[in-house]
Image: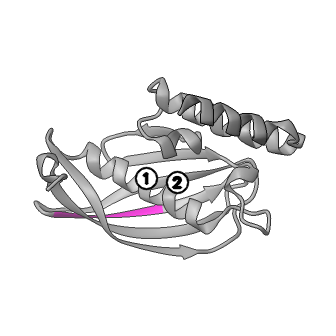
């Protein structure tokens, strides 16, 4: 396995451009962040998410780079959705007692402007917390302060022991 991976790495880097090497470096640094516990998930590490959680909000900041761009050179809508879902899910999970988690059941996103600049910040807040479900809201702003997306999400509250059943 390691040998195959090293061969692939050599193939990818042998004739890589500076731009491609920068992208690969970013991916490897993100992997390392997960590996060393700086991020709790691979996606958080790969996107270099920085998070701040309080009792009523979660703020995620993600630097923008070519890795997260679509072919038009702007932030990919799927990455925006991932950032929103991550912020909402993190907040939802932080509000639950030990042994419980939250899973997304619905995510509604309105894209309002293109994602560009140095970074985007997503601020998620809780709208409703019941015994079996939650509803959250989120706004995504780019580094110049312009709102690029607003969203709502619904989450089921589940016992973690039932995840593999």
Q: Do tag 2 and tag 1 residues touch (Cβ < 8 Å)?
A: yes
Residue positioned 36% across, 40% down in the render: 54
Residue positioned 88% across, 41% down in the render: 15
Colour setup of the view: one colour
Residue most toward the top? 36
Q: Which residues are magenta?
A: 133-138
Residue positioned 57% across, 68% down in the render: 149
Dot 2 or dot 1: first in sequence order is 1
* Nearest-to-viewer mark from 2 and 1: 1
Viewer-side residue, 104 vs 51: 104
Viewer-side residue, 10 vs 77: 10
Residue 61 horizontal/vertical position (percent) = 57, 45
Is residue 22 in view?
no
Tell me the SS state at disc 2: strand
The residue singled out by tag 2 in the image is 122
Residue positioned 59% across, 39% down in the render: 48
Residue 27 horizontal/vertical position (percent) = 65, 39
Q: Is residue 51 left or right of residue 23?
A: left
Quadrant of the rendering where the C terminus is positioned:
bottom left
Is residue 156 in view?
yes
């Amino acid at each position: 396995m390691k040998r195959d991976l090293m061969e692939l790495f050599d193939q990818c880097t042998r004739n890589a451009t500076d731009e491609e090497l920068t992208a690969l470096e970013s991916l490897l640094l993100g992997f390392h962040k997960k590996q060393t516990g700086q991020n709790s998930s691979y996606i958080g590490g790969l996107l270099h998410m920085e998070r701040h959680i309080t009792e009523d909000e979660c703020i995620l900041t993600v630097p923008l780079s070519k890795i997260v761009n679509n072919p038009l050179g702007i932030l990919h809508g799927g990455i925006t959705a991932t950032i929103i879902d991550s912020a909402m899910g993190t907040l939802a999970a932080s509000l639950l007692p030990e042994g419980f988690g939250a899973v997304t059941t619905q995510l509604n996103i309105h894209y309002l402007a293109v994602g560009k600049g140095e970074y985007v910040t997503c601020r998620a807040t809780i709208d409703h917390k019941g015994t079996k479900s939650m509803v959250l809201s989120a706004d995504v702003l780019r580094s110049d302060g312009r709102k690029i997306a607003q969203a709502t999400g619904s989450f089921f509250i589940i016992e973690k022991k039932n995840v593999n059943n």
